[in-house]
Image: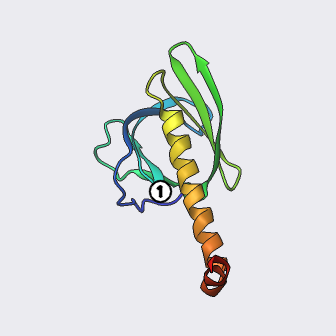
Amino acid sequence: MKGPTVTSGAAIKEGKLEKRSENLFQLWKKKQCTLTKESLLFANGDGKGSRPKELSFDSIWKLECVERKGTRVYFTIVTTDQREIDFRCEEGTSWNAAITMALVAFKNEQAVREFRSRKPARRWRAWAS
C-alpha cells in the first residue's frame, strides 16, 4: 500500500466496503471507498476527516478467495509483497467484480505499454509493409 498520494482518476465505483483490521482482534471497519482506473482509495467511516489511503494497482498482485456468507461477499486482495488484505461487502454491490475488472484492465494496459517500449518502432513499420 502506498502513502496518501491520491490519484486524480475518475471514479469507476464509490461506496462502502468493510476492511478487516490487522490488529489482534481483527475487527471489521467500515470504509468509504472509491475505485479508479489506477487504485482503490479508502477512508474511515464516512470518508470525512483524514485523507484516504491508496492501494495502487501497481502494488496489487491479485484478488482471490471470493466467498459468499449470508448477505455478504468476502474477498482478499494480495499485494505484490504477499500481504493479504481482507474486505467484505454486501451481496449485490459487486465490489469484488468491479475491482477485478479494473485490475485486469490496468495490468493489460501496463503489459501493452511495456511490450511497445521494448519493440523498436522501425521493426513494426518493416513488418507491416
Whole-percent x, y for residue 74 in the image: 58, 27
Whole-percent x, y for residue 32 in the image: 37, 38
Residue, far bottom: 122
Residue at screen point 54% across, 55% down? 106
Element type where label 1 sits in the image:
loop
Please give the count of numbered marks on the rendered protein: 1
Label 1 sits on residue: 38
Q: Quadrant of residue 31?
A: top left
Whole-percent x, y for residue 78 in the image: 65, 45
Q: In which quarter of the image is residue 44?
A: top left
Viewport quadrant of the N terminus = bottom right
Q: Is residue 128 left or right of residue 29?
A: right
Residue 19 seen in the current view: no
Colour mapping used in the image: rainbow
Viewport quadrant of the C terminus = bottom right
Q: In terms of depth relative to the viewer, which is nearer, 129 or 102?
A: 129
Residue 9 seen in the current view: yes
Residue at screen point 44% across, 52% down? 53
User: Quick check: 95 above or below 109?
Assistant: above
Residue at screen point 35% across, 53% down? 51
Whole-percent x, y for residue 111 in the image: 62, 63
Residue at screen point 28% across, 44% down? 48
Q: How crowded is mark 1: few (under 14 residues within 10 Å), some or many (20 or more)?
A: many
User: Quick check: 66 above or below 48?
Assistant: above
Amino acid on which disc 1 is placed: Glu
Residue, far front: 129
Q: In terms of depth relative to the viewer, which is nearer, 13 or 27?
A: 13
Residue, far left: 48
User: Quick check: 99 above or below 25?
Assistant: below
Residue, far top: 70
